[in-house]
Image: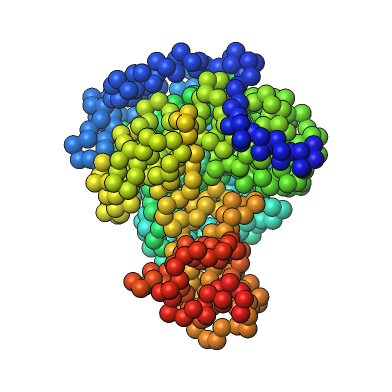
Amino acid sequence: MTNKSRNDTIDSILKEDRRFLPSSQFVENTSINNHNLKTLNQLANDDHELFWAKLAHNEIDWQTHFSKTLDDSKAPHYRWFDEGTLNVSVNCIDRHLIDHADKTAILFEGERGDTQTLTYRQLHSAVCRFANALKLHGVKLGDRVVLYMPMVPEAVIAMQACARIGAIHSVVFGGFSAEALKNRIEDAQAKAVITADGGYRGGKIIPLKAACDEALSQGCSSVQTVFVLNRTEENVTMVPGRDIYWHDAIQHISDDCPPQWVNSEHPLFLLYTSGSTGKPKGIQHSSAGYLLGTIVTMKWVFDAQASDVFWCTADVGWITGHSYVAYGPLALGMTILMYEGAPTVPDAGRFWKLCEDHKVTVFYTAPTAIRALMKAGDEFPNQYDLSSLRLLGTVGEPINPEAWMWYHRVIGKERCPIVDTWWQTETGAHVIAPIPGVVATKPGSCTLPLPGMDVAIVDESGKEIEEADKGGYLVIRKPWPSMLRTIWGDDKRYIETYWQRFNNKYYVAGDSARRDKDGYYWIMGRIDDVLNVSGHRLGTMEIESALVAHNLVTEAAVVGRPDEITGEAIFAYVVLKGQRPEGGIDNKLSVELQQWVTKQIGAIARPKEIRYADNLPKTRSGKIMRRLLRSIACGEEITQDTSTLENEAILEQLQGKQ
Ligand code: WT7
C-alpha cells in the first residue's frame, strides 16, 4: 500500500469512527464473554465491596482470611482486606508447585542470543535461596531493598525474594544515572542494593556496578550490603565487607525459606515516578490489593490462558514490568518471556524473531516501540512467522491511528484484538481497557473502564461532564484494591497531588480525557507539568533543576514538543549566566548540557533541542508562560497574550529569529 492510500484509509477509519470487532476465532476460546462481563459490571455497580471481596476470596491464597473488605474511616487512606495475611511470592510461585512444578515460568533471552529457562520448581528454589541470603545479610521485614538490574531472570528472582521475606523492594530503572539512583536510595533509606556487574543493551555493556559505586560514594549511608550479579564478567571493584557476588551469597544456602506472612496492607514495593516538582515520588503499593489488581486484569484484559507465552516488553524498572512481568502472569502460573536487550539489535526484526522463536501468544508493548519498528519497514516483521500471536496490547501513551493500524495489519494480521490499556504507576493495574472478545475497539481509544473501576470525567467544579466529546479531568470516584497507599515519607504530598483538587473525594489522575458518544474514553494528555517521552513520565521541573545545577545556567524552562517516535520530545529554553550565544544557538554547549542532564537523571531526560535566551517569558506573578513556550517549540503561531512580557524582543529570541 502506498503512503497516500494508507493515509486515506486512516482518515476514513477516523471519519467513520470505525470499530474493530474481535475475530470469531478469538472469541471462541476466551474466558470472558458478553454475558460474564455484564454480570461482573452488574455486581460491581450493585455492591462495590462485595464485588471485590468475592474476587479477593477466589483469586488469592490466604494464610488468614480477611475480616473487613474496605476500611474507609481514614479516607483518602484506604485499607483493603484488613486482617488478612498472605505472602505474594507464595501466590506467584508455591501455589503452582502442586500441579505445574515443571511448567516453564520464565523463558529468557539475552541480547546476544543466550537463553535460559526456569520452571516453577526452579524459580521457587532460586527465590528461596536468594531470600535466605538476604536474611543472612540482615535484611528484615519492612526493610527497603533497591534493585538496579538488567532485564534478567535474577531481577524477578530478587523481587520475589524480597516479597518472600516481607522486605520492600524499590526497583530503579537501569537507564537512570548514579545521581538518580543515589536520590532514590536515600529517600527509601535502603538497607541493601542488588545490582549486576553490567547488562547488555544496544550492543553495549551498561556499567551498573560502576554507577552504583558512584551513587554510594556520595552518601547512601543506610546501605549495608551490595549484592552483585555476575552477568557480563566485566571487572568491577568490590568493596570488602559491603559487596558480595550473588553466586557467593547463595553458596551453601538452603532453598527452604518459609514465607513471611504479612498483612494485606504491608507495602510490597515502592516505585519512584516523576511528578510536577523536582523530586520523584516513591509510590507505595500494598500486598493483597495490588496482587488482586494484577490478577484480575491479567484475566480480563489479557485473557490469560494456561497455554500462553506472555511477553510484556517493559523493563522491571517501570510499573508495567512489575504488574505484567514480575507479578501478574506468575500469579496465574503462566509462561513469560523476558528479553534483556534493545528492540533493534541486531536489527529491527528482533522483537518479531523473538515472537517466532518463543511462540509468543500475547504481546504487550509501548506505542513508541511500535512507531519505531513501523518506521523500519514491513520487511522486518514479514520475515517471521507471527502466527502464534493471538492478542496484542499497548500502554504508556495514546497510540496514533497510523501506528494502531500497522500493529493490527502487519503484526496481528487483522486477526488479533488490540488492547489499549490506560493506567498509571499509581493505579497498580489497568483501569480503562477493552475486554478483548467483548468490547469493540477504536484506534486511539482505551475504550471503557474495567468492572469495579468508577471512572469519570469532571469539570473544574468537580461536576461530571455527561456531554460527549467535552474534555475534563479524569478521576476515579471509588477506591480500588490496587491503588497506591501513599507517597513514601511524604503523606502530605500524597493528599495534595491526588486528592485535594476535589476535596479528597476523587482520585485525580493528572490526565485530561473526553468520552465520545459511545462512552469510549480518549486520553488527551497530562494536565500538570509532566512530559511523556517514549511512554515514560518525566517532570519538567526535574529536568529544569538538573539544567540549573550546571554552573553556566541561571534559569531553564522545559516543555514537550510532539515527536514522531517518542510521542513527546524535550525542548529546553536556557538562560546563561554569561552572554547569550550568537543567534541563540551554541552546539558545543548544548552537547555539554545534554550530557549533563544524562548524568543527572539518565539518557531518557536528555533535551532534544536547547535554545538560549536573555530571559524567559513570565506572567506578572512570575510564572513561566509554558503554554507560550510550547507553542514556540511546536513552531505554532502565537495566540497568547504577550503584553505582560518584560521584554518583547525575547519572543524573537525564543523563536530563534534573532
Ligand atoms: C501516564 C502514566 C501505566 C504504565 C506506563 C506508564 C499515560 C498510560 C496510556 C494509554 C494514553 C496513557 C497517561 C498516564 N498513559 N497509558 N493507554 N493511553 N495515555 O506509567 O509512568 O505511571 O504514566 O501515562 O498520561 O497518566 P506511568
Taking the image as drawn, is residue 270 in sight?
no
Where does residue 537 sit, x and y in percent of width and height? 49, 52
Near-viewer residue (215 or 523)? 523
Image coordinates for residue 122, horizontal then vertical, percent: 56, 30
Q: Quadrant of the N terminus?
A: top right
Q: Is residue 57 left or right of residue 355?
A: left
As rendered, which of 496 and 125 lies closer to the eye? 496
The image quarter containing residue 609 is bottom right
Up-down relation of residue 578 to residue 414 (above or below): below
**Measured from the top left, where is residue 653 in percent x and y?**
56, 77
- Residue under the point 35% across and 41% down: 458
Q: Residue at x 77, y 28 (%)?
A: 385
Q: In the displayed orientation, state which residue is furthest to the bottom.
A: 579
Horizontal side, residue 650 vs residue 347: left or right: left
- Which color scheme is applied? rainbow
Task: Report the quarter where the C terminus lies.
Answer: bottom right
Q: Residue at x 56, y 83 (%)?
A: 580
Residue drawn at x 30%, y 25% is 48
Query: Measured from the top left, where is residue 116 in percent x and y?
Result: 66, 35
Total labels drawn: 0
Which picture quadrant has residue 352?
Answer: top right
As drawn, 405 above or below 206: above
